[in-house]
Image (spheres, rainbow, N blue to C red):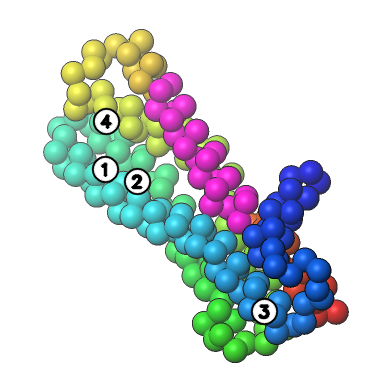
């Protein structure tokens, strides 16, 4: 509750700074809230764009290494596992890639009720994708870290020992886990929390 209260306080300071002592009508509320919705959407869109590029790089890199080291069957198998583990994630990703496109934001004159409906739908879709992403991360992060460890061991002068492999895997796993944590917080948790607060304000205004 403290976190949500803090978020609401920050949002109110940002969007209602000059209106704290007056009652906002629906027209004014729309003008203030729509830019705030777009701002939070942009954080989610940043992830979607970055992940789309990341997918291309992952598939291209793994395919390249499979061809280059085709004679090394164990290494090829590692690359194939990496590709196969990414396919389900890519399918779900593309199903949700348009979830941040709101009809109300495409039409600046959309009524408050339409904005509220579209925002509610978006929150549900993004939340559904984020839930899947968090579950996938528990499997995907170790698998991708293992594949990256195999690649590093293959193409770098790192000694091919169990100790070196374990250290490389541990460092890669720690970096991936930390990056994913920050990414989830900045691109999903905080934007979703703020969008829910905006939706609550819209509901209160429309009632």
| CA distance separating discs 4 and 2 | 13 Å
Residue 102 higher or lower than 153, as above or below = below
Q: How far apart are marks 2 and 3 (CA)?
A: 45 Å
Q: Where is residue 203 in the image (x, y as percent from the top left)?
A: 79, 73
Return the mark for residue 30: 3
Q: Which residue is drawn at 39% across and 16% down?
A: 166
Q: Please name whichever residue, 8 or 135, is drawn nearer the observer in this view of the structure.
A: 8
Residue of label 4: 151
Q: How crowded is mark 4: few (under 14 residues within 10 Å), some or many (20 or more)?
A: some
Between the C-alphas of marks 1 and 4, the distance is 9 Å
Mark 2 → mark 1, Cα distance in angstroms:
7 Å
Observer-nearest residue: 77 or 23?
Answer: 23
Look at the numbered discs 1 and 3 and tell me whether their residues touch, using CB distance below 8 Å.
Answer: no
State which region is magenta: 170-191
Circle 1 sits on which residue?
62
Of marks 2 and 3, which one's residue comes earlier in the chain?
A: 3
Whole-percent x, y for residue 170 in the image:
43, 21
Q: Of the residues tagged 2 and 3, which is closer to the observer? A: 3
Of callouts 1 and 3, the N-terminal one: 3
């Amino acid at each position: 509750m403290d976190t949500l209260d803090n978020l609401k306080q920050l949002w109110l300071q940002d969007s209602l700074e000059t209106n704290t002592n007056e009652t906002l009508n629906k027209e004014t509320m729309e003008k203030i809230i729509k830019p705030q919705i777009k701002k939070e959407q942009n954080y989610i869109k940043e992830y979607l764009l970055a992940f789309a590029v990341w997918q291309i790089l992952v598939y291209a890199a793994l395919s390249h290494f499979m061809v280059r080291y085709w004679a090394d069957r164990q290494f090829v198998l590692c690359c194939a596992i990496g590709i196969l583990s990414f396919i389900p994630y890519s399918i779900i990703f593309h199903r949700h890639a348009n979830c941040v496109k709101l009809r109300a934001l495409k039409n600046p004159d959309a009524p408050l009720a339409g904005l509220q409906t579209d925002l509610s739908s978006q929150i549900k879709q993004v939340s559904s994708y984020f839930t899947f992403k968090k579950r996938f991360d528990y499997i995907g992060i170790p698998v991708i870290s293992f594949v990256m460890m195999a690649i590093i061991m293959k193409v770098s002068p790192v000694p091919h020992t169990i100790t070196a492999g374990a250290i490389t895997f541990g460092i890669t796993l720690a970096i991936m886990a930390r990056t994913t944590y920050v990414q989830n917080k900045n691109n999903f948790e905080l934007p979703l929390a703020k969008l829910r607060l905006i939706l609550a304000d819209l509901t209160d205004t429309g009632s």
